[in-house]
Image (tube, coloured by chain):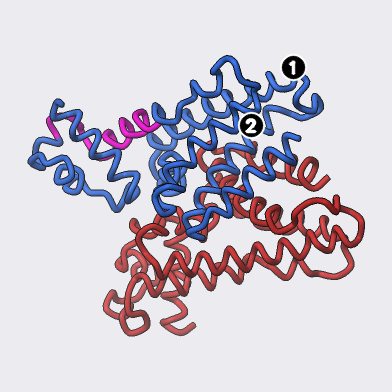
Chain colours: A blue, B red
Amino acid sequence: MSKREEIARAALQQFQAHGFHATGINTITQAAGVPKGSFYNHFSSKEESALETLNRYAATLRFDMLTEPGRPALVRLRAHFEHLGRDTLDNGFVRGCLAGNLGAEVADHNEEIRSAVRHGFDRWASHIQQVLDEAQEAGDLDSALDTSATALFILSAWEGTLISARVEKSAAPVEAFFRIVFDVVLR
Amino acid sequence: MSKREEIARAALQQFQAHGFHATGINTITQAAGVPKGSFYNHFSSKEESALETLNRYAATLRFDMLTEPGRPALVRLRAHFEHLGRDTLDNGFVRGCLAGNLGAEVADHNEEIRSAVRHGFDRWASHIQQVLDEAQEAGDLDSALDTSATALFILSAWEGTLISARVEKSAAPVEAFFRIVFDVVLR
């Protein structure tokens, strides 16, 4: 593994575990097992490493699950959120969503990071909307539902759900999400 | 105003604007216009001032609006969320909810703050559930809806909605929240 790769992986873990301000370049290089100075051979700033981290995180979200052929649209949507919840549910209700966490922590103050999270949210909402459109075409979803507003709402609801699960240290918010989204909103 | 009151008010503003880690005791005392040392005459730590800040923030949420007599339950619920969204919508999509922000930033690492946010969320969810129960009794809400899961879900959805609004710098997530919650979930 290249030194850049080691630093980038460590940065992803640290930002996920601690957020933006509580993560120092020191923490990242220590976790990567490289000298502190080597950070700047690969990244110009902590912000730049956070932006790379967001890209790497997006790749773990498995948007491809949403378009996987062979399963009904709403079954794919449910599997997608089950995938997204696994890390938080299996690890004692920690971490949540890196994009949502960085958004909550620094959207007001760091335009580069806000813009990267926004780009990720927009892409994600558009994937969710496509799935909802497909479900409508297949007759599995009320055709009167506004799929654009619903996709945006489901995304926001999911981000808040992960915060509640971490605050409550409980799966109840995640269970409520699946119940209301799939049995009420998308019935 | 007492010096303690000045420090507590400044702490609320600073934690709301910058989050937990980006707010230093220095920043708080500067904003309060008091010498740095005087902070420790009133609070033992930054954490203690954040806990007091959460209490003061809870008082601004106007849970009393949810029980105000004379208006149907769901009308009161809508007015409550319109009240909660006003600060973020009127100020360029910043700040959001202090409890959700502290939850997202430090729930994994600070048990005292997590527990205070959890207490606030639990109290809030129980208020929302009461309103939904009332709406069911009045025949304004599907009696098959699980009001406990729905209250928890609406709370989480609202927290995520404020993050999306700050990330998107747009009212669209808030509009989607009102549309899906009131026209679809609570129809």
- Give the residue displayed 80% in from the left and 24% down from the top: A143
Which residue is labeled 2 in the image? A151
* Horizontal and vertical percent position of residue A81: 54, 36
Residue A42 drawn in magenta: yes
Q: Nearer the viewer, residue A166 or B20?
A: A166
- Give the residue displayed 41% in from the left and 75% down from the top: B7
Residue segment shown in magenta: A40-57
Answer left or right for A58 relative to B185: left
Secondary structure beneath dot 2 equals helix
* Horizontal and vertical percent position of residue A86: 46, 41
Q: Chain of mark 2?
A: A
* Horizontal and vertical percent position of residue A182: 68, 38
Q: Amino acid at mark 2?
A: Ala
Answer left or right for A134 relative to A5: right
- Farthest residue toward the front? A70
Q: Is residue A16 above or below residue A68?
A: below
Q: For the stretch drawn in magenta, what is the main secondary structure?
A: helix
Secondary structure beneath dot 1 equals helix
Where, by quadrant of the figure, is residue A150 drawn? top right
